[in-house]
Image: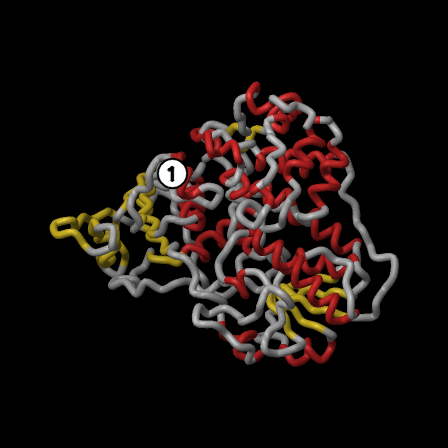
Amino acid sequence: MGKVTGFLEFDRQEQKYQLAADRVRHFREFTLPLDEHDLKKQAARCMDCGIPFCHGDTGCPVHNQIPDWNELVFQSDWEEAARNLHSTNNFPEFTGRVCPAPCEEACTLNLENQPVAIKTIEQAIADRAWNAGWVKPEPASHRTGKKVAIIGSGPAGLAAAQQLARVGHEVHVFEREPKAGGLLRYGIPDFKMEKRHIDRRVKQMEAEGVRFHYGVNVGVTKPLDELTAEHDAVLFAGGAEDPRNPQLPGQDLVGVHYAMPFLVQSNRRVGAEPMPGNGEQPILATAKNVVVIGGGDTASDCVGTSFRQGALSVTQLDIRPRPPEREDKLSVWPYWPTKMRTSSSQAEGAEREFQAATLRLEGKKGKVTGVVCTRVDEKRQPIPGGEFVLPADLVFLAIGFAGSVRKGLLEESGVAMDKRGNVTANTVDYRTSNEKIYAAGDMRRGQSLVVWAIREGRQAARAIDEALMGASVLPR
C-alpha cells in the first residue's frame, strides 16, 4: 500500500450534509463532497487486509475491488480507479449514493468503529469519471444475431441490458413507465439520487445499441407470447411491487395510503412528468400531521419527502425494539449488524416511536384523524396499559412488499413461484420453469438492495449469453 500507516495517521472522515433547515427547502442532493486531498487521506486508511471482507459476499454483492481502487485513489490514478470500479459495477454512481454500505460494516477498521469511508470514495470516483469524460459508450465489435427482451428497467434490468448489448446481442428493454429506472426513478427521492444520473446512463446504453420501449406493460398492453416469439430469451426484471397489507381497521379512511403511490407522485412532480390520467388523487403532506408506519428505507423516504412538502409534524412507528447504539463486534462482524441508525431524513426532525404496534386507524366523516397504537414487548405482544393515540391527517403504510404483482405478466407467463411470492429461479442459470424465460433482481429474490439487483442482472446476463452462445466472456 502507498501509506502503510495511513489508518493510524488519519481519522475517518465522510462527506458532510447541508444543514437540515436548508436541505428540506429543496429536493436536490445535499451532500457536500470531500476535496481531493481529504479523499486521498481516506483512501490511505485502507489496511490492505489479508482477507478483505469488504469485497466478499458479506461486504459487497458485486465484489467491488475496494482495496485496489483505494490504492489507486491514494496514488492519484483516478482514471484507472474508475476502470477498476466499472469492471465490477455498471452503475457506481447509483450505489455510491443509495447503497447502505455493507462494505463499511465488513471493514476490518470497523472493529474499532472507524471503517474506511468506502461509499464516499466510490461516489467520488464515479462522479470524477463522468466529469472527466472517461465514461463512454462501449458498443460491441460484432453482432451475434440473437435478440433478448428485458422486462423492467430498474437496476437489474439495466445491468443485464448493458452487459448483453456489449457482447453483441440485440437488446430490447420494455418499461411500463414513461422513463427508465424503475424504483430508482420513481421510488427513491431526488434528494438521495437525482435522476440525471439515470438519464445519462440511458444515453450511454442507447449508444451501445440498447433499445428502450416505454409505456409498454407486458402482460397487460402487450401479450407476453408476442415477446417470447420475437426474442431468443426473455428476462423478468420487474421488481417486487406488491405492498404488504396489514389489514388494519380503518385502513380505507381518506388520508391512508401505501408508501409507494406517495413517493411515485412526488418523484413525478419533481421530474416535471405529467400525472397519469387514471383519476388518482394528489397525495400531499403540506400542513399535515404525518404518521409513517414502518422502520425501513421506504419509510425514511416518506419522512424526508413529507418534510420537503411542508408537513407540520412527522412521526415514524417501528414495531422493533430500539436497537443498541453499538453492536457486539465479536459476535456480529463482518456481517450487517443491528444497531441504532439515523437516516438523514429522520435527522430532519422526525419523532421515532419504537416497540409501537398499530392497532387501528380512527377517523371522522370518512377522513383519518388518528393512529391508535400500543407498546409491545420483544415478542411483539401488546403491553397492558400501553395504548396511545397519535393525531394524524396523513398515514403512510411502509411495511415492505409481499413479492411481485401477479396480475398481468406473471399470470400470463405461468412460471413457478415460491411461497414468498417471488419467481422461482436459481443463481446459477437464473432460468425459470419456462426455459426461455429468466428472472433476476427483486422479482426473483424479493425486496432487496440496489447493489444486489445489479449483481443479479450481471449474472443473469452471463447465464443468458452462455445459453445462447454456448460460452460467455461476461463475468459472474
Q: Residues within 10 Å of mark 1 (few under 14, many from 20)?
A: some
Tell me the kind of residue under disc 1.
Answer: Glu
Q: Where residue 260 appears, x then y in whole percent?
A: 45, 56
Residue at 26% across / 61% down in the picture?
Answer: 366
User: Does residue 240 appear left or right of residue 346 in this picture?
Assistant: right
Question: Residue pushed farthest right?
Answer: 142
Q: Where residue 355 appears, x then y in whole percent?
A: 26, 48
Count of marks, rendered view: 1
Q: Which residue is mark 1?
A: 327
Residue at 58% across / 50% down in the picture?
Answer: 61
Colouring chosen for the image of the structure: secondary structure
User: Does residue 330 appear left or right of residue 103 in this picture?
Assistant: left
Q: Is residue 223 visible?
A: no
- Secondary element under disc 1, as helix, strand or loop, is loop
- Quadrant containing the C terminus is bottom right
User: Does residue 466 appear left or right of residue 225 in this picture?
Assistant: right
Q: Is residue 452 visible?
A: yes
Quadrant location of residue 469?
A: bottom right
Question: Residue pushed farthest top?
Answer: 9
Q: Where residue 413 appears, x then y in whole percent?
A: 58, 78
